[in-house]
Amino acid sequence: MSATLDRSLDLLEALAQYPQGLSLADISRHCHIAKGTAHRLLLHLATRGYVRYDERTAMHLPTMQMPVLASRLLERMGFLDVCQPELDRLADLSGELARLVWRDGERLVYIAEAQGAGPGLRYDANLGRVAVLHTTAAGKTWLAGLAGEHVKTLVRAQHLLGDPSLGPCAIKSMSELMTELARTRRRAYGLAIDETEVGTSAVAVSITPSAIAGRTADALGCLAIVGPTARFSRVRMVELVPAMQTAAASIAQLWPIRSFCRGPEGSLTRRLTHFRTRQGAP
């Protein structure tokens, strides 16, 4: 049963690459299965509406049944639901809080999360909160892709540079920030240790569409992992970066389907609008 299912999926994946259709011989070669087996599978898939046979060209073609199924799924999901498995995997891997931080105009907003830490010492979430750009790992990751004057404008607009209520290691001057952003650009991830508040550490990577990979100024947002400084060491944060970059790439690849995602929680734009309105922001 398992082998039959695997072969059927191989066959559908092969046809999805050739919308103009494939002959039985081509399918057999492409999927590494005997013609007789391929023929039986094609007949079954045809009865279920996934494949059709063109007698004029002797080609087997995929139908719209697969896109219809995908569309039904996306209609019942929001974009955040689609991204959530990546957050869940990072939370399980790290044992800490994984966050999706999204760009909303000239700011970053915490819009989704997954908690990987057990009861006890852990960092709790704060959905809807706007990131302090110069003291958070996500904020520094995003700022690292912007021009210097733009960075200064955004940071000054938050009126928090040098604020004594921030953590003991918070950056206190613009020159110090520019030095830190240069480091962030070189290593391609941001770090924050006891900066926004004492006892909290975080690491973040940029979510950038593959077509413009590397241009963090065009980043959609960031993935961050946050935990208690007492447990979440710099070494551990750096170890997690490759997995975070893989997750960020997966979310960036999902971005083109956002307009098809119409789950009950509303669109991503509506979620950001809700956060913006709740905080009295323009």
Image (cartoon, rainbow, N blue to C red):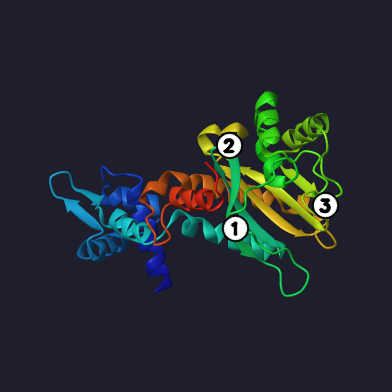
- Tell me which numbered mark, 2 or 1, is placed earlier along the sequence: 2
Q: Label 2 to label 1, Cα distance in Å?
A: 18 Å
Callout 3 secondary element: loop
Q: Label 2 to label 3, Cα distance in Å?
A: 24 Å
Looking at the rendered structure, the kind of residue marked 2 is Glu
Instruction: Write the residue at 85% across / 46% down.
Output: 169
Q: Quadrant of residue 208?
A: top right
**Tag 2: Cα neighbours inside 10 Å, few (<14), some, or many (≥20)?**
few
Q: Are marks 2 and 1 in contact (CB under 8 Å)?
A: no
**Tag 1: Cα neighbours inside 10 Å, few (<14), some, or many (≥20)?**
some
Q: Position of residue 85 (x, y in %)?
A: 54, 61
Callout 2 secondary element: loop
Residue 22 at least partly seen: yes
Marking on residue 66: none
Toward the viewer: 169 or 31? 169
Looking at the rendered structure, the kind of residue marked 1 is Leu
Say which quadrant the N terminus sits in. Answer: bottom left
Toward the viewer: 167 or 111? 167
Instruction: Write the residue at 28% across / 56% down.
Output: 68
In the rendered structure, the answer to whether residue 183 lies left or right of residue 69 reads right
Callout 1 secondary element: loop
Q: Residue tagged by mark 1?
A: 127
Looking at the rendered structure, the kind of residue marked 3 is Asp
Instruction: Write the residue at 71% across / 63% down.
Output: 96
Q: Quadrant of residue 44?
A: bottom left
Q: Position of residue 134 (x, y in %)?
A: 74, 40
The residue at the far front in this view is 280
In the rendered structure, the answer to whether residue 255 lies left or right of residue 160 reads left
Q: Is residue 228 above or below residue 238?
A: below
Instruction: Write the residue at 75% across / 67% down.
Output: 122
Marking on residue 194: 3
Q: Residue tagged by mark 2?
A: 106
